Amino acid sequence: MRLSVILTLILTLVTSLSLTAAPARALSQRSLSSAAPGDVLSSRPTTVYLLPGKLLEVPVDAWHLLYRSTSAVGAPNAVSATLLVPKAAYPFGRRPVVGYAVGTHGLGDRCAPSVSMREGRETELALVSLLLLKGFAVAVTDYEGLGTPGRHTYMAGISQGRAVLDSIRAATRTPGAGLSASAPAGVIGYSQGGASAAWAAQLQPAYAPELRLRGAAAGGVPADLKAVAAHLEGKPDFGLAAAAGVGLDAAYPELDLYADLNERGRALMAEAENACVGELSGFAGLRFADLSPVDLLALPKWTARLTENRLGAMPPGVPVFLYHATGDQIIPYAVGAELRAAYCRAGVNTRWTAVPAGNHVLGAVEGAPLAIEWLALRLYGLPALSGC
């Protein structure tokens, strides 16, 4: 899928969805302490644009949500999300709800997808539009600490997976959205979002068993953070590994990252705390040894948390579609292939697609439409064929 195709999808979205005015929505307020996971703490109508300058408004009913979720260490937290619901009635029963997990946006609040959608600079809306055109409701979480007080727990998979699941719960509890808690649900994402979608699938049987999850599609999955970090050392995209260190430190206070950094490391990591993904170039070509006098990845405290956040140990209870670019320069192809092997060994109904793309971004552009079509069939109730 090239730019011309994406622009065609955008124009199709604008012209295909009903343009009736969105009714006013009532706010729902609850205190965090008394709320259950997925409860809506606040809800307000919002407007989403496909292009900067408030051009090409997405013709859907949209809400900015604040909902209760759970951190990586089990504490209640408040997470924000954007809920998009097509205006046209869904003709096939209960409207499916998809938890869409975005890829890496950055660590600063201004990088949150809820912000970029309101400002017309969210590139992943071209893919979200494919779900909306099928009549599905889409909940796009900002993840913990992105768009809300606190630090973003970037790449803390357990936190991210819970945020995705609770965004689906919150969508069905949003006043006026017309969504049912018994509707079929799915999760999908790429890169950071791929890890989040896979974690949601793994956690769902124990964390959100009432959700009628039908499938999970995950691409470019950084399933083994330690392997990905080792791969990125000395490379142009090392900033992503450094950002993951900041995110895990936010999720697990005992890691105390800054205490183990040198002066240069502390300065760069502090900058990363407020940076968006395109602003991590200061880390290009560096290694963890340039930022710390100790071998961070070998410290027992880091080894324990990295192991805890490695995907594959808990089998999802639903079919899974995995895809990975053969030329992915950021997440090694072997990391994605190993996750597929782990799921197959555990008896998970797994479909694997090797996307013949030359880099990580093209893997998303070319693979996501395949993943969306696969997920749509699951939401329609059709069985999945395993590729194991």
Image (spheres, grey):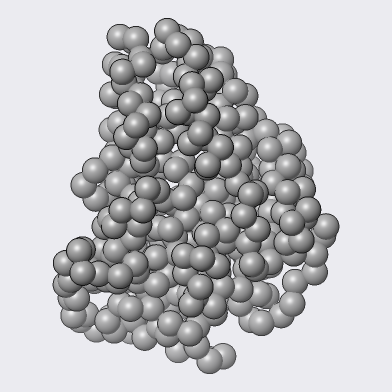
Q: How far from the left and from the top, in percent, is residue 22?
A: 28, 80
250 up-or-down from 204: above or below: above
Q: How far from the left and from the top, in percent, is residue 124?
A: 48, 53
- Residue at image position (28%, 55%) is 77
The residue lying furthest to the right in this view is 388
Instruction: Decide if residue 116 is in sight here.
Output: no
- Residue at image position (69%, 54%) is 322
- Residue at image position (48%, 85%) is 182
Closer to the camera in the image, 139 or 231: 231
Count how many numbered circles sit on residues in the image: 0
Q: Is residue 46 left or right of residue 178?
A: left
Q: How far from the left and from the top, in percent, is residue 340?
A: 73, 50
**Where, by quadrant of the figure, is residue 266 drawn?**
top left
- Residue at image position (41%, 13%) is 291
| Image quadrant in which the C terminus is located | bottom right
Instruction: Decide if residue 99 is in sight here.
Output: yes
293 up-or-down from 136: above or below: above
Q: Is residue 354 left or right of residue 38?
A: right
Q: Is residue 265 left or right of residue 123?
A: left
307 up-or-down from 265: above or below: below
**Where, by quadrant of the figure, is residue 28 drawn?**
bottom left
Q: How far from the left and from the top, in percent, is residue 372?
A: 62, 64
The residue lying furthest to the front in this view is 300
